[in-house]
Image: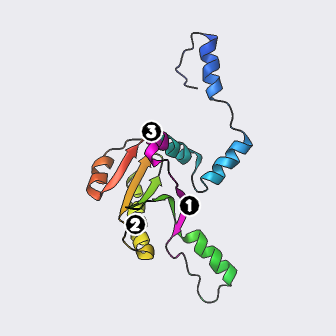
């Protein structure tokens, strides 16, 4: 509840409190299974983006592993090696595969320049693994507008969306 908000009626207060109801454990688990690699703040940003852009409410893959991961060397037991690879591979937040393009999304609260680095790395690793066709569209979805981000996005050919 905003600290500087003055409620003039009990109905206003009740309406604000109703918005703040606790999320049930079942809802938390369902959300976690739906977006396995996203934090609660990232899920909120993504859902706000989808609500504002219904055309993007299509089949989306989450937590896409890319890259080769760490190699522990020939002396590592296979189970440990497998686990090390899985834990050290890069994780793309969201991917949409369309007939004419691949959309790769990085969803980040208060995104800075590191988000661009992640996206450019994901594109390079995607091309190595899957090839350059169809073309890849990179999307940085965030909640806060930061200085120089929009001009950097334009220069890099990245779609930059601030959900507010």
Marks 1 and 3 in Cβ contact (< 8 Å): no
Mark nearer the viewer, 1 or 3: 3
Badge 1 is on which residue?
A: 63
Give the image location of residue 164, x and y in percent: 43, 37
Circle 3 crowding by C-alpha within 10 Å: few under 14, some 14–19, many from 20:
few
Q: Which residues are magenta?
A: 49-69
Horizontal relation, residue 67 to residue 157: left or right: right
Which of the two residues, 164 or 132, is positioned nearer the viewer here?
132
Badge 3 is on which residue?
A: 52
* Point 53% across, 19% down: residue: 5
Horizontal relation, residue 98 to residue 135: left or right: right
* Point 45% across, 55% down: residue: 106
| Quarter of the rendering containing residue 75 | bottom right
Badge 2 is on which residue?
A: 123
What is the spatial separation of the Cα atoms under label 2 and label 3, in whole angstroms? 25 Å
Give the image location of residue 116, x and y in percent: 38, 58
């Amino acid at each position: 509840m905003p600290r500087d908000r003055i409620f003039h009626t009990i109905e206003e207060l009740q309406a604000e409190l109703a918005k703040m109801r606790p999320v049930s454990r079942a809802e938390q688990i369902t959300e976690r299974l739906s977006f396995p690699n996203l934090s609660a703040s990232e899920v909120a940003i993504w859902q706000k983006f989808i609500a504002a852009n219904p055309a993007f409410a299509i089949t989306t893959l989450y937590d896409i592993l890319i890259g080769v991961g760490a190699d522990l060397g020939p002396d590592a037991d296979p189970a440990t090696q497998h686990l090390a690879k899985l834990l050290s591979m890069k994780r793309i937040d969201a991917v949409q595969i369309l007939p004419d393009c691949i959309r790769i999304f990085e969803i980040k609260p208060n995104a800075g320049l590191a988000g661009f680095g992640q996206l450019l790395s994901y594109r390079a690793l995607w091309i190595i693994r899957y090839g350059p066709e169809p073309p890849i569209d990179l999307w940085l979805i965030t909640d806060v507008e930061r200085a120089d981000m929009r001009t950097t996005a334009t220069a890099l050919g990245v779609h930059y969306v601030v959900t507010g």
